[in-house]
Amino acid sequence: MQFHGALTKSGTTIQVEAALLVSEPNQPAGSLFLARADARGVDQVTIAEVLPMIGGGDTRLRLSTGDIFRLPAGREHSKLESFYPRRSRMGAGLSRLENVRWRGVVALSIAFVFLAIGIRFAIAPVGDAMARMMPPHLVERASTMVLTQLDLVILGDSTLPQASQDQISKEFERLLALAPAEYRNTRLHFRSAPGIGPNAFALPGNDIVLLDELVTFADDDDVVLGVLAHELGHVAEQHALRQVMRSAVVAIGVSLMVGSEESILEEVAGFGGSLVLMENSRAFELEADHLSADWMAAIGRDPQALVRFFQKIAEECGERCDGGSMLASHPSFSERIEALSE
Ligand SMILES: [Zn+2]
């Protein structure tokens, strides 16, 4: 076997083509010979020193003759390594690792981090752009489908007296007049769901669901209207749709980063993505709270009604129901009360 390279004569800059020979025909086992282009015979040599690599370049070997043999980078030369001085063998292994795997890992990690950062900052703008590009009739259809599904699974008919429903609807109309034109057709759906408790929610389209349980629990017209104003804020800012689209960006980003296979990496990347989504949805909640306060004030109703609602929930079920924390999708009631009181 011949390892071709260049030989620099000791103390000079003159280079000649040369080759180190291992296990060539008639060559004694375990011996190393040097053949030079400028000389006829071959000399038996040993490797005295493996010189430090310069940035993963050529391998430089100081031979027993004092000459430096330069082996071009990228050639497989593991057969030669058994001739390295004992001390250098581990070093050679390490520098090979450094050459190939280490640098590969570093390059991949850097690419991964940049991709992750890119996706992290793309989640909101890309998701929001996708939400804006959705044709309104498709959004409406999706919203209707969600409501139909919820009706099948968990929602029941409202048992609120018709007079109360009419009263709430009439007040709601006043809020609608304040919303941007394309959201003034937002529909208010009365439902009941003992399994969910006192709640109201906005669907991806122009639909708001108000549960009887909230009306009963609040027992306060301003609070009910304040909650509806909050939900209308979600509709007017397309929070639900934007959240769905942002989740889609996370899903696409995760599969870009780690492929579509099930792996712990996917879990980790997905978890990172959902943290970003939660942070977004906390911001959405606070935004809707603010819109609620503004609109309530604009129609001459109590802008602090939501605060009373949060306080009442906190009183009735205490810390247990105060869902806010670093990992929660909702800010805590105390956070929201504080934000609204400003
Ligand atoms: Zn909300």
Image (cartoon, rainbow, N blue to C red):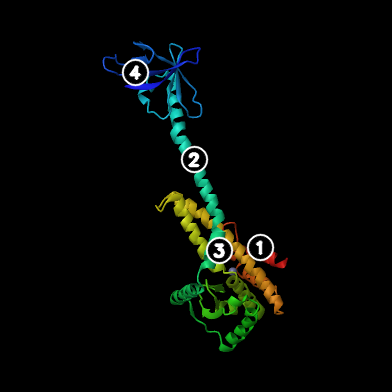
Q: Which quarter is ligand 1 in? A: bottom right
Q: In this orientation, does residue 311 appear?
A: no
Q: Residues within 10 Å of mark 3 (few under 14, many from 20)?
A: many
Label 3–label 2 contact, CB within 8 A: no
- Spatial distance from mark 2 to mark 4, Cα to Cα? 35 Å
> What is the number of the mark on residue 21?
4
Which residue has dot 2 on it? 107
Q: Nearer the viewer, mark 1 or mark 4?
A: 4
* Residue at far left of view: 26
Q: Position of residue 53 (x, y in %)?
A: 49, 25
Q: Is residue 271 left or right of residue 293?
A: left
User: How many residues crowd mark 1 within 10 Å: few (<14), some (14–19), many (20+)?
Assistant: some
Compute the Cα span from label 3 to label 4. Answer: 66 Å
Residue identifier under label 1: 335
Distance between the alpha carbons at the discs numbered 1 and 2: 42 Å
User: Would you place residue 150 above or below residue 158 in this image?
Assistant: above
| In the image, farthest residue toward the bottom | 163
